[in-house]
């Protein structure tokens, strides 16, 4: 974790939580209360010098929602710099446009689930316990 957030940053994060955008509220309704792969997401999470729209500590995953202002030239540069900084901190950043959240929520949630599955599944499946998949020593999958 980076340096502790200042009291001003914590206060600003509280302000942002109390004044969510419509799109943030829509996505939050689907992320809150461990609805996605039993993962805990936090909203407007301070990670100095930034505040992340949504953050999952378990996955080190930041989800950012981009409204129209993010597509202006200066904002794009700022977002790239911010993403690079967070990646250097070991945080994966995934960005969705407000339009994607409004029009294709199921696809947004599927992408978050795929990231979660890739991050939480073991690299190699563990072998089946002895006797699993057999019936009296004969494989269930063998034709007789």
Image: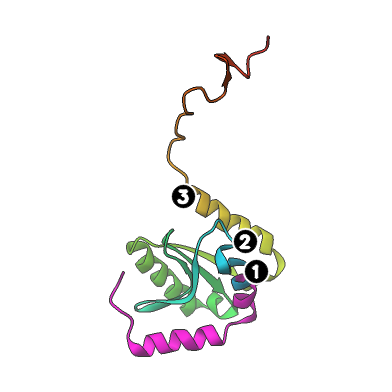
Count of numbered badges drawn on the protein: 3
Query: Residue at point 47% right, 86% down?
Result: 14
Q: Is residue 62 above or below residue 21?
A: above
**Along the viewing direction, whichever of 66 and 4 lies nearer the viewer:** 4
**Residue 12 covered by magenta stretch:** yes
Q: State which tag comes first along the sequence, 3 or 1.
A: 1
**Along the viewing direction, whichever of 29 and 107 lies nearer the viewer:** 29
Residue matched to label 2: 108
**Image coords of residue 127 (percent x, y):** 45, 29
Q: Which residues are magenta?
A: 1-27
Question: In front: mark 2 or mark 3?
Answer: 3
Residue matched to label 1: 101
**Residue 102 covered by magenta stretch:** no
Q: Residue furthest left?
A: 3
Disc number placed over residue 120 in the picture, else none: 3
**Image coords of residue 19 (percent x, y):** 56, 87
**Image coords of residue 18 (percent x, y):** 55, 87
Q: Is residue 140 above or below residue 99?
A: above
**Image coords of residue 61 (percent x, y):** 45, 62
Query: Residue at point 64% right, 80% down?
Result: 22
Q: Main secondary structure of the magenta part?
A: helix
What is the spatial separation of the Cα atoms under label 1 and label 2, in whole angstroms?
A: 7 Å
Q: Are marks 1 and 2 in contact (CB under 8 Å)?
A: yes
Res 142 quadrant in image: top right
Query: Residue at point 60% right, 78% down?
Result: 68
- Circle 3 packing at 10 Å, graded few (<14), some (14-19), many (20+), is few
Q: Is residue 135 above or below residue 30?
A: above
Question: In front: mark 3 or mark 1?
Answer: 3
């Amino acid at each position: 974790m980076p340096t502790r957030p200042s009291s001003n940053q914590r206060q600003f994060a509280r302000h942002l939580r109390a004044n969510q955008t419509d799109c943030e509220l829509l996505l939050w309704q689907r992320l809150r209360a461990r609805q996605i792969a039993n993962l805990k997401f936090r909203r407007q999470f301070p990670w100095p010098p930034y505040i992340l729209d949504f953050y999952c500590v378990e996955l080190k995953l930041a989800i950012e929602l981009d409204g129209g202002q993010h597509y202006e030239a200066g904002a794009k540069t700022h977002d790239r710099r911010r993403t690079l900084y967070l990646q250097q901190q070991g945080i994966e950043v995934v960005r969705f446009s407000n339009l994607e959240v409004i029009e294709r929520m199921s696809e947004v949630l599927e992408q978050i689930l795929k990231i979660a599955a890739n991050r939480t599944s073991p690299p190699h499946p563990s072998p089946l316990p002895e006797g699993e998949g057999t019936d009296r020593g004969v494989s269930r999958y063998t034709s007789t």
